[in-house]
Image (cartoon, grey):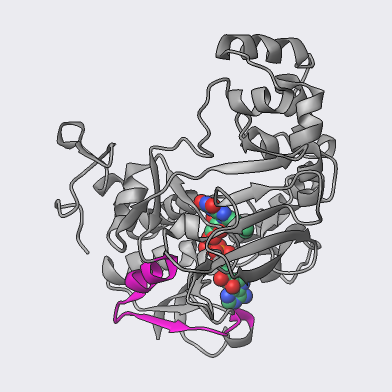
Amino acid sequence: MFDYVIVGAGFAGSVLAERLASQSGKKVLLLDKRNHIGGNAYDFYNEDGILIHKYGPHIFHTNSAEVFNYLSQFTKWREYEHRVLASVDDKLLPIPINLDTVNKLYNRNFTSEELAKYFEEVGEKKDEIRTSEDVVVSQIGRDLYEKFFRGYTRKQWDCDPSELDKMVTSRIPTRTNQDDRYFTDEFQFMPLLGYTRMFENMLNHPNIHIMLNTNFADVKDFFDYDQVIYTGPVDEYFDYCYGKLPYRSLCFEHTTLDMPQLQPVAVVNYPNSENFTRITEYKHLTGQEHTKTSITYEYPCWDGDPYYPVPKPENAELYQKYKAMTELLPNVHFVGRLGTYKYYNMDQVVAQALTLYKKLSGIDTLRDLAVPKANKTKVNGSAVPKIGSPVFKG
Ligand SMILES: Cc1cc2nc3c(=O)[nH]c(=O)nc-3n(C[C@H](O)[C@H](O)[C@H](O)COP(=O)(O)OP(=O)(O)OC[C@H]3O[C@@H](n4cnc5c(N)ncnc54)[C@H](O)[C@@H]3O)c2cc1C
């Protein structure tokens, strides 16, 4: 007899399993159809002994001290600021586009003020910003859009940016300074010993029973339980009764090269050439030292595991139909990227799971981990409470 069956051992399912077991004393059965915990953040040592991410690069970044503090109970961190280059016109140029990108691309010598003026001149005036194309061409003009965004987006989504919701390209800023960090969040770290080790620490509790290689649909009638937390695809739960919600998938080609380093940064994007979108080199992320280096090519495709909900109005409408069905099931809770058909980063999924935990238990982990202003301590240049302060119960 379990209090909860949790479907999916990614961030959403694992946070809820940890909270329900360790804070509320509930008995939890955690299922995953894959042969490992960690969901898409799973990492492992390959046959050459290099730590790689099975489902592509996962970089932790957040502005939430509460989320960072919560996860800090289960891992130490390695400081890491992500940088990405794009291969354009035979040059490797910073992305997001910044002052150096434009100066190096066009052999110019703009100052920040001159670049801001340039963007104003080349940006196309739009009455309404509706699509991903509108966002970019209105900010930086058509040439930079064609060189950095159009081809990449077409590969990634198999459609033109003019057909995609504005949120896809709105996520990527444009800068007139030389800041070449991909993210500007306050907390940018990688789990020191990897994500999988962090998940193992979260789930190491006698009240959590884990079953891998197990599809919920195959076993749901064999156990007694009160409630279900479902982090798999919401349309699959309802047997696709309104039709399939489309997801974009990726094919990952992992390989190891007999050289210590291939590229200057962890990720190089290929917006225009090649069939893959990007190459990731893991040693930049993990800091591992090794005579060889492991890399991953990413090929977007339609068949395969569901990764990215496709942000189009008709899909949002279809999701609303499934959402209405979820509301008729008070003992089944849908959460996570697949359960709510929404593109979330890891920290957002952690916050979403902690919010659901509050609803189920009345215990507000995010509030408990909030930092009283007077108690703020500088750690690695960021304001966080001291590890070992009363908020860390683990
Ligand atoms: C290529 C890629 C790169 C990313 N990079 C970043 C990044 O750099 N930074 C960042 O913050 N976020 C990143 N993300 C997003 C991140 O992966 C998600 O935010 C996070 O994994 C979501 O966690 P989740 O628990 O909702 O889903 P998942 O991690 O997908 O976990 C869901 C789990 O449910 C299991 N499952 C599904 N259906 C069933 C079933 N019927 N029975 C049993 N088990 C089932 C699945 O096997 C899966 O393990 C990236 C995502 C991708 C695809």
324 inside magenta stretch: no
Ligand 1 occupies quarter? bottom right
Where is residue 388? Give x, y as percent.
15, 55
Work out which residue is located at the far bottom of the displayed protein and give it. Answer: 222
Q: Looking at the figure, which quarter contains the C terminus?
A: bottom left
Residue drawn at the location 52% of the way across and 67% of the way down = 52
The foreground one among 111 and 95 is 111
Residue drawn at the location 60% of the way across and 61% of the way down = 56
Where is residue 220? Give x, y as percent.
57, 83
Residue 176 visible? The answer is yes
Can you say whether 216 is above or below 347 in the image?
Answer: below
Q: Does residue 257 appear to the left or right of 199 in the view shown?
A: right
Q: Looking at the figure, which quarter contains the N terminus?
A: bottom left
Quadrant of res 141: top right
The foreground one among 103 and 36 is 103
Q: Does residue 143 appear to the left or right of 27 in the view shown?
A: right
Q: Please give the range of residues in magenta.
A: 194-217
Q: How many marks?
A: 0
Residue 334 visible? The answer is no
Q: Does residue 204 appear to the left or right of 325 in the view shown?
A: left
Quadrant of res 376: top left
Can you say whether 98 is above or below 243 in the image?
Answer: above
200 inside magenta stretch: yes
Where is residue 351? Give x, y as percent.
43, 50
Can you say whether 339 is above or below 69 in the image?
Answer: below
Where is residue 172? Give x, y as percent.
62, 35
Q: Does residue 89 appear to the left or right of 33 in the view shown?
A: right
Residue drawn at the location 59% of the way across and 23% of the way down = 99
